[in-house]
Amino acid sequence: MDSVIYQIVNGQLVEMREQPYDTEALLQDLLASHPNLLAGEQMNPAQPRRWLLVRQEMSVPDTQNGSGRWSLDHLFLDQDAVPTLVEVKRSSDTRIRREVVGQMLDYAANAVVYWPVEQLRADFEQLCDDRGVDANDEITQLTEGGDPDAFWLQVKTNLQAGRIRMIFVADVIPPELRRVVEFLNGQMDPAEVLALEVKQFRGGNTQALVPRLIGQSAAAEQKKNVSASPGEALWTSERFLAAIASKGEAATRLAQRILDRAAQRSWTVVWGKGKTQGSFMIGPPGMKHRLAYVWTYGVIWIGVDQLRQYPPFDDPERRADFIRQLNDVANEALPHTNPDQGYQLPLEIFAQRGEALIDLIDQCIQEVAAKRQQV
């Protein structure tokens, strides 16, 4: 039996019955025009997600600097600069039961590696030009006063850390897809996997859309979310160490040792403002670009690409040598050997060689500082 909702219009009761969308494109266009349909208030009632559309039909390459192999239906960003990949299917499309999951994972696995943030920014600015709005104003409004350059840097950091959100959207989410989404969302961290039903009701000339979020089990949310204290904008060492403790003794101990060395050496330490995950960034004293980011989900990101801003690491050979040193410390093959990309690594792999990692970071920062003094 079709679902029914009722609306009172001019004192008359209008019966509205659930109807499928005539085409998939209709639902895609509705999401692009009305991003609030993504139900950000259901994802996080305490801090509802707000959205910016970057582009419809977003190309996803499968090689460095490659042309797009796939086309994602929508790419959105929320106020914490979390890339949100959206794929739309009608319930009548049999691919929604199985094929769409593999499709989305292909998109996500390649996007975090091969999406240059500069291209994402250019696509967003082009969309804003087409709509006659200012791109920087849109970001400032989304972030309630945030700096656009810092926002795009956070987009880059989130991609490199795998902190993304994947959403399957349909008029009806079949049970098979729901079970897969709930399983993936419970296992993946920091990535988030959700499904969203956007049911359509029609009666006379009236249309109503009812979004319902699926996939956020209580256990998964407790695992992923670390809520900010009321009125607290920045993370602190105490709060960070308490949050990362859930990732084990090795991760907690290494984070503490990095902070201790930073204090001893007067490194620049910048604390993140994440609502659900904490971070701190370290770098040479007084320098804008950071060498490493440490996250409460037990990951360190080594910004080899950031090093090229500073001598002697503006030399690709010196950066390549740094990668070799990092590989020796990690004692395992790194995910790539490109001197112009960053490295996301679990803190736990340095459980026995944490001091060697800190010494390598220290050496790098000292080299940068020494070159600056010579200028």
Image (cartoon, helix red, strand yellow):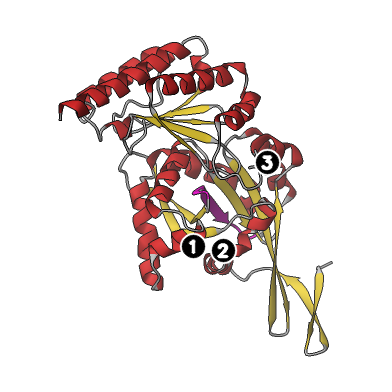
Q: Which residue is mark 2?
A: 35
Mark 1 or 2: the one toward you: 1
Separation of residues labelled 1 and 3 (CA atoms) = 35 Å
> Could you tell me which quadrant the C terminus lies in?
top left
Residue 236, percent from left and from top = 55, 34
Using the rendered view, name the quadrant where residue 287 is placed.
Answer: top left
**How many numbered marks have been drawn onto this rendered protein structure?**
3
Which callout, 1 or 2, points at the residue further toward the start of the chain?
A: 2
Residue located at (82% from left, 89% from top): 11
Relative horizontal placement of residue 306, taking residue 372 as reference (left or right): right
Q: Which mark is residue 180?
A: 3
Q: Relative to 127, does residue 237 appear above or below in the rendering?
A: above
How far from the left and from the top, in percent, is residue 28? 55, 64
In x, y percent, where is residue 301? 44, 30
Front tag of 1 and 3? 1
Residue 299 location (% of width, % of height): 51, 28
Answer whether labels 1 and 3 touch (C-beta < 8 Å).
Answer: no
Taking the image as shown, residue 5 lies to the left or right of residue 73, namely right
Give me the C-alpha separation between circle 3 and circle 2: 25 Å
Q: Sequence order check: which comes first, mark 1 or mark 3? A: 1
Q: Which residue is mark 1?
A: 141
Callout 3: SS: helix
| Chain part drawn in magenta | 80-90
Instruction: Identify the disc placed on residue 216.
Output: none
